[in-house]
Image (cartoon, rainbow, N blue to C red):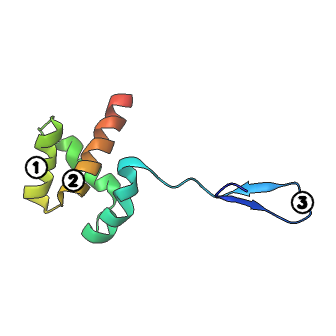
Amino acid sequence: MLVGQDVSAGSASVSRMAEPVKGPASYFPSIEKKYGRPISEWQTLIRSSELTKHMELVSWLKSEHGLGHGHANALVAHTLKEDAAG
């Protein structure tokens, strides 16, 4: 049996658990819990900034909004990727 599979005795059906969130979005629950703002609000802040470079935005979130480096980096990476995808 593969990890994440549940095979019921006497049944041909197999159900799989949901895939865990990967990449920058995996930080989102802890960001919302720690800073008390939804991710959409952080993304609005990032998009409204005059800054455009990844590390400039990360530094800004750290200095002006008190985020840790990993959380700021995850928010910026995810937001810029969404924007690039259109």
Q: Amino acid at mark 1?
A: Ser
Residue that mark 3 sits on? 11
Asked if the residue under mark 2 is in contact with the one under mark 1, i.e. CB atoms within 8 Å, the reply is yes
From the image, state whether disc 2 or disc 3 is nearer to you.
3
- State which quarter of the image contains the N terminus: bottom right
Residue 4 rendering spot, x and y as whole percentages: 65, 58
Label 2, residues with CA under 10 Å away: few <14, some 14-19, many ≥20: many
The residue under label 2 is which amino acid type?
Ala
At x 15%, y 44%, the residue is 57
Q: State which tag comes first along the sequence, 3 or 1.
A: 3
Of 24 and 8, the residue lying toward us = 8
Where is mark 2, residue-wise? 72
Numbered label attached to residue 31: none
> Which residue is disc 1 drawn over?
59
Image position, residue 73 (x, y; %):
23, 49
Asked whether disc 2 touches disc 3, contact meaning CB atoms under 8 Å apart, the reply is no
Quick check: marks 3 and 1 in contact, CB under 8 Å?
A: no
Indicate whether 76 appears above or below 34.
Answer: above
Is disc 1 surrounded by few (<14), some (14 to 19) or many (20+) residues within 10 Å? some
Q: Secondary structure at mark 3?
A: loop
Residue 8 quadrant: bottom right
Decide if residue 5 is in sight here. Answer: yes
C-alpha separation, residue under disc 2 versus residue under disc 3: 47 Å
Front: mark 3 or 1: 3
- For the residue pair 9 and 56, the one nearer the viewer reads as 9
